[in-house]
Amino acid sequence: MRLTTTLLLVGVLSIPAFAQQRLPNVTVQTLDGKKVDSRTFSNDGKPVIVNFWATWCAPCKKELNAIAEKYADWQARTGVKLIAVSIDDARSMARVKPYVSGQDWDYEVYLDPNGDLKRALNVNNVPHTFLLNGNGEIVYQHNNYEPGDENVLFEQVLELVGKKK
């Protein structure tokens, strides 16, 4: 009985801490190799989606392509911005820029070749998606991808900006 109560309290106490979590100060790279601090990811007070993916991850590419089909509408309705962070390492990082160039993605794309941002956010598998509110606080996260998950994500964005579907 005592153990159950303790676990319940830990679970309840962790929820507010999660709601206030922000992106850590970690250096990532643009596709051209320019260094960028992840804390500078912003969208003028509007929501930001940060999606971790890799060129070798089929579900990642399916998710980003599914979102790409709806992204212009999402932006028009909510002002949301998507930032795609590739976790490809030194061996596969050279494939990211050509792959992205061949896609119809209107996203900011960054490289996390050492996995620093991935580790700081405890991303264990991809795809892993975070939703940040206008203050840069993480308010939702989801990992893996099944068709239709992009709709659940957009519902979260709509709720965040106070709009109905």
Image (spheres, grey):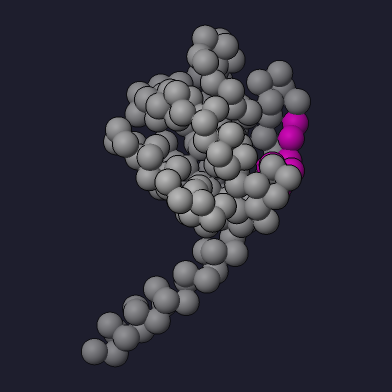
What residue is drawn where x is 55% and y is 32%?
84
Is any atom of residue 165 visible in this view? yes
Decide whether residue 37 is among the magenta residues. Answer: yes
Q: Is residue 136 above or below residue 127?
A: below
The answer to which image quadrant residue 153 occupies is top left
Q: Nearer the viewer, residue 117 or 101?
A: 101
Q: Nearer the viewer, residue 25 or 138?
A: 138
161 to the left or right of 126: right
What residue is drawn where x is 39% and y is 37%?
150
What residue is drawn where x is 68% and y is 29%?
29
Percent x, y of residue 76: 58, 34
Is any atom of residue 90 visible in this view? no
Percent x, y of residue 148: 32, 36
Q: Is residue 29 above or below residue 11?
A: above
What residue is drawn where x is 69% and y is 42%?
43
Magenta region: 35-41
Decide whether residue 114 is among the magenta residues. Answer: no
Q: Nearer the viewer, residue 12 or 86?
A: 12
> How many badges with numbers are in the image?
0
107 to the left or right of 164: right
Q: Residue furthest left?
A: 1
Percent x, y of residue 134: 65, 52
Percent x, y of residue 22: 63, 56
Q: Residue furthest front?
A: 164
- The quadrant of the image that shows the N terminus is bottom left
